[in-house]
Image: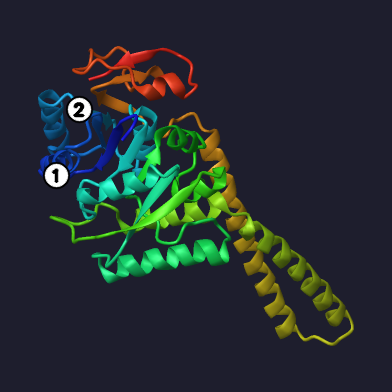
Amino acid sequence: MEGGVTVLVPCLNEGRQVDVAYEKLVEALRDIDDLEILFVDDGSTDDSLARIRALSRADSRVNYLSFSRNFGLGAVEVAGFRYAAKKWTVQCDADLQVPPEEIGRLLDKAAEGYDVVFGERRNRQDPWIRKAGSGALQWLAVRVFGIGFPPGASNFRVVRSSVARTIAGLGLTWFIPAVSLVGATYALVPVSHQARAEGESRLRLSRLVAYSLELFFGFSWRPLTALYATAALGALLAVVSVVAGLAGGAGPVLLGSVAVLLGGLALAALGLIARYLQRLMKQAGRLRPYYVREASILLHAADALESDAPTPTVRREPAAAKSSGTTGPSVAVG
């Protein structure tokens, strides 16, 4: 692939799966001469980081970033895209539920001129509740909230790294709907899917709910539009109730029911507005989406938890540091 390929591998307590992922990725991509494998450790508490360190020492194609704590998949993607050194970035989970052999098909499709190529999982081997939840999420996003969500798109994908950095710079939690938002060209390629090699998914229900809310309220104004219509209807209902009460056409039970209904609508409206305000306050906060405690590559000073950390094993200025438009010095961490 012209310009080289970075394989972004998010990791959270993957244990020995780190070595398995490395071996299978290297084997599947043996024909790519300009290859980088970038592990992003999202605050693992097991031996994942130690295993990644060992791989980086043994193979110069392996680089890594290790967060100071668990910041979530969105932060992993932002950091991974920012520091990917090659022209193309492949996002591939460490559990390898989509076999690495499928990467070549996505790269071939991207070579036709697309900015993003998503893997569309066929015969998905996940628990039924996970599949049903994903289906419901996508249906709600498209049909109810009017969000441009490519049906069937997954996190297994190939992205032009420059485009990925543009999207990551928007500060949004979700990558998939942002592709349509910026007008990037995309395609979907059917890929096989298999059961997780070991253990369970690290993505818990609470995190899934949080991601869903970020999707709905981060990419759609329809909830506020519905709120305006509901407020107008509630105001009309209140006026009618008052007039009916004064004219003796409504008893205390009916008036009390209307008052309770209007109170409930007011609380719901308050909660909806609070959700949007929460997003604005979060974006205006001083905390960055992630902090890196250790890395094998040079970092932007703002990303490093410790600006005076020792020199990394691999001395390489990340391509993103030259093209992301961020000012300020880079520092070595690791």
Residue 74's image quarter? top left
Who's the residue at 68% across and 59% down the image? 225
**Image side of residue 182 versus residue 20, left or right:** right
Q: Position of residue 23 (x, y in %)?
A: 11, 40
* Res 24 label: 1
Residue identified by numbered label 2 = 61
Q: Amino acid at mark 2?
A: Arg
Please state if 45 lies on the left or on the right of 113 as rendered: left
Q: Amino acid at mark 1?
A: Lys
Image-based side of 187 in relation to 93, left or right: right
Where does the N terminus fall, quadrant-wise? top left
Give the residue furthest to the front: 112
Spot the residue most to the right: 247
Q: Residue at x 35, y 50 (%)?
A: 155
Front residue of 213 and 55? 55
The reply to whether discs 1 and 2 touch (Cβ–Cβ < 8 Å) is no
Q: How is the image coloured?
A: rainbow
- Name the residue nearer the viewer: 172 or 22: 22
